[in-house]
Image (cartoon, grey):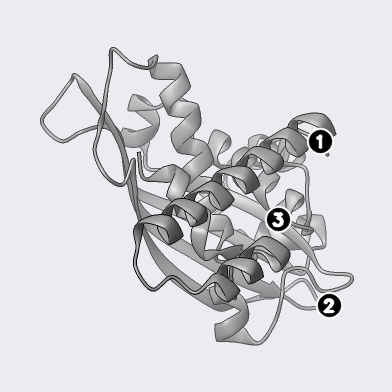
Amino acid sequence: MTFFSFGQRFHKQFFNTITKLVMVLVLCTTMSGCNYFILLGYLIGGPPSIEPDFDAQTQKSMTDKDVTVAIVCYAPLELQYNFDGLHNDLAKYTTFRLHSHGVKVVNPDRIRAWLDENPDWDKPEEIGEAFDVTYVIHVELHEYSLYEENSSDLYRGHAEGMVTVYEMDEDGEGEKLYSKEITSTYPLRAPRATSEVTFSKFKKEYLSRLSDEIGRLFYEYYRGDDFTHAI
């Protein structure tokens, strides 16, 4: 499954790496007492990585050999009414995030087709059994918005929800293994004027950001990764 070409991923990773290095250099030239050995370590090996919360809590990993994952997202009808296809979009973006970090993930189009064919499903474990996966990641949104509170001229993405992981056994039975509340805000520092970016572009930016926040529960990331999301 490929959502973006290799070239696009390479250019994006290259840009992010250069951005982080420039920020480290700026910090070290503007702050007294900067340890240049630390800077050298950043340049050689990158910034310190952070262990995924899922790994820390369960002593398991989504990237282990032979592990397969299905992702399903749920949004209440009032959110789907205001943001058509929100649950499907978030599932697709989150699937891409995990796939790009080495997790074997079921194509979201296959899961969407199964959901359409089985409208009476009521447990994420049913999806795990249908696709014979190791884990099912169930993302349930409680709140979602793209505008700053009480404003129609400022964009600021906000979401709250719950991420739950079910572990499947050989008999197709699932057991809740992990759960985590999520609260997301983007941009972090200040909202953006609607005159600066189109609605569709900001919507894609926030889905990308939110899916990364969810993905970080399951893959390693770095302390400097949020610099580019602050503005």
Amino acid type indicated by mark 1: Thr
Q: How crowded is mark 2: few (under 14 residues within 10 Å), some or many (20 or more)?
A: few
Q: Residue 4, percent across and down?
A: 75, 31
Which quadrant would residue 67 be assigned to in this image? bottom right
The dot on residue 170 is: 2
Q: Do the residues bearing badges 2 and 3 touch, measured as CB atoms within 8 Å?
A: no
Work out whether 107 lies above or below 170: above
The dot on residue 70 is: 3
The residue to which callout 1 is attached is 2
Amino acid type indicated by mark 2: Glu
Q: Mark 2 or mark 3, which has the lower sequence index?
A: 3
Q: Residue 225, percent across and down?
A: 52, 54
- Nearer the observer, 1 or 49: 49
Q: Residues within 10 Å of mark 3 (few under 14, many from 20)?
A: many
Q: Taking 183 as reference, is 152 left or right?
A: left
Q: Distance between the residues labelled 1 and 3?
A: 16 Å
Local secondary structure at mark 1: loop
- Nearer the observer, 207 or 229: 229
Quarter holding the C terminus is top left
Amino acid type indicated by mark 3: Ala
Work out whether 14 lies above or below 102: above
Taking the image as drawn, is residue 155 in sight? yes
- State which mark lies toward you, 1 or 2: 1
Which quadrant would residue 30 be assigned to in this image? bottom left
Q: Mark 1 or mark 2, which has the lower sequence index?
A: 1
Residue lying furthest right: 66
- Nearer the observer, 230 or 197: 230
Local secondary structure at mark 2: loop
